[in-house]
Image (spheres, rainbow, N blue to C red):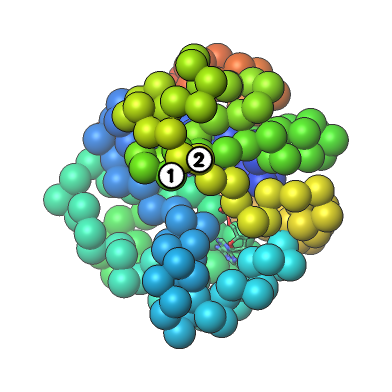
């Protein structure tokens, strides 16, 4: 089963993708994570993408399509993919359809996570993650149980994304509405879209996504 998680920045795609990975044995492919890794490693791609990401704009289609194409065969023997943050433009969606068709696969379902823009700004500006294991937290909605200590691995160093500040979030939202939202129509025409209320708590959204996967072959 190959899934696309679609929704604005801060809708909880990364959190739900992780839960789907653990619960359904799917391989999570996140272009945001791949690009941040390229920036951290100082590769040529990282140098090209870094400034664009800091402005909250979209990295050119050909660069992210190449990234996904390179990773597509990883985990090919597994249960399928969850795409988090890709595709983000119609050109990317068309490229994804081609890449999957070449492998006799397809996008089986697209989960759209709906959240108000104002809630997103609050959600995003409060998020942080463990520097050691990557577990995600939020100042208000999901603090660590013991202040300053990661619940999962006991790590004590935390990081915040550079683009998680209000100004950049507003420009990421603008990019979402202008370039990514049209994908909802693209996939609706293919009969693949199910919508969940991304304003609900993490466990409720997880249950709603599981329901939205009913009838999709594993
Ligand atoms: P994310 O972690 O998905 O919020 O992505 C962080 C940033 O990486 C975005 O604001 C974009 O600058 C860039 N990015 C991630 N995925 C894509 C994509 N599919 N197309 C273009 N840019 C992307």
The answer, for residue 65, to whether it is visible in the render is no
The residue shown at (62%, 37%) is 127
Mark 1 and ligand 1: say if the CB distance to the nearest ligand atom is below 8 Å.
Answer: no
Q: Secondary structure at mark 1?
A: loop
Give how far across and how far down residue 139 sits, in percent: 65, 27
Q: Nearer the viewer, residue 161 or 85?
A: 161
Q: Secondary structure at mark 2?
A: strand
Q: Nearer the viewer, residue 134 or 30?
A: 134
User: Do tag 2 and tag 1 residues touch (Cβ < 8 Å)?
Assistant: yes
Q: Quadrant of ligand 1?
A: bottom right
Say above or below: 115 vs 51. Answer: above
Given residues 110 and 104, the one toward you in this image is 110
**Mark 2, residue position:** 158
Relative to residue 61, is residue 37 drawn left or right? left
Q: Is residue 44 visible?
A: yes
Tell me which corner region of the image, top left, top right, bottom left or bottom right, holds residue 198.
Answer: top right
Q: Which residue is mark 1?
A: 131
Q: Residue furthest left?
A: 77
At a point 45% along the width and 67% down the height, the residue shown is: 40
Residue drawn at the location 44% of the way across and 25% of the way down:
149
């Amino acid at each position: 089963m190959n899934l696309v998680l679609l929704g604005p920045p801060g809708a909880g795609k990364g959190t739900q993708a992780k839960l789907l990975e653990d619960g359904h044995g799917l391989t999570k492919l996140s272009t945001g994570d791949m690009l941040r890794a390229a920036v951290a490693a100082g590769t040529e791609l990282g140098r090209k993408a870094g400034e664009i990401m800091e402005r909250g704009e979209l990295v050119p289609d050909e660069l992210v399509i190449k990234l996904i194409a390179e990773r597509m065969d990883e985990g090919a023997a597994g249960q399928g993919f969850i795409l988090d943050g890709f595709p983000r433009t119609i050109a990317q969606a068309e490229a994804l359809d081609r890449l999957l068709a070449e492998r006799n696969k397809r996008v089986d379902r697209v989960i759209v996570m709906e959240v108000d823009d104002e809630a997103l700004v609050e959600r995003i500006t409060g998020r942080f993650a463990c520097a050691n294991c990557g577990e995600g937290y939020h100042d208000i909605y999901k603090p660590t149980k013991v202040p300053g200590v990661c619940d999962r691995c006991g790590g004590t160093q935390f990081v915040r994304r550079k683009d998680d500040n209000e100004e950049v979030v507003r420009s990421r939202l603008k990019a979402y509405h202008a370039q990514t939202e049209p994908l909802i129509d693209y996939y609706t025409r293919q009969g693949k879209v199910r919508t969940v209320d991304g304003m609900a708590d993490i466990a409720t959204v997880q249950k709603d996504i599981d329901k939205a996967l009913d009838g999709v072959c594993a």
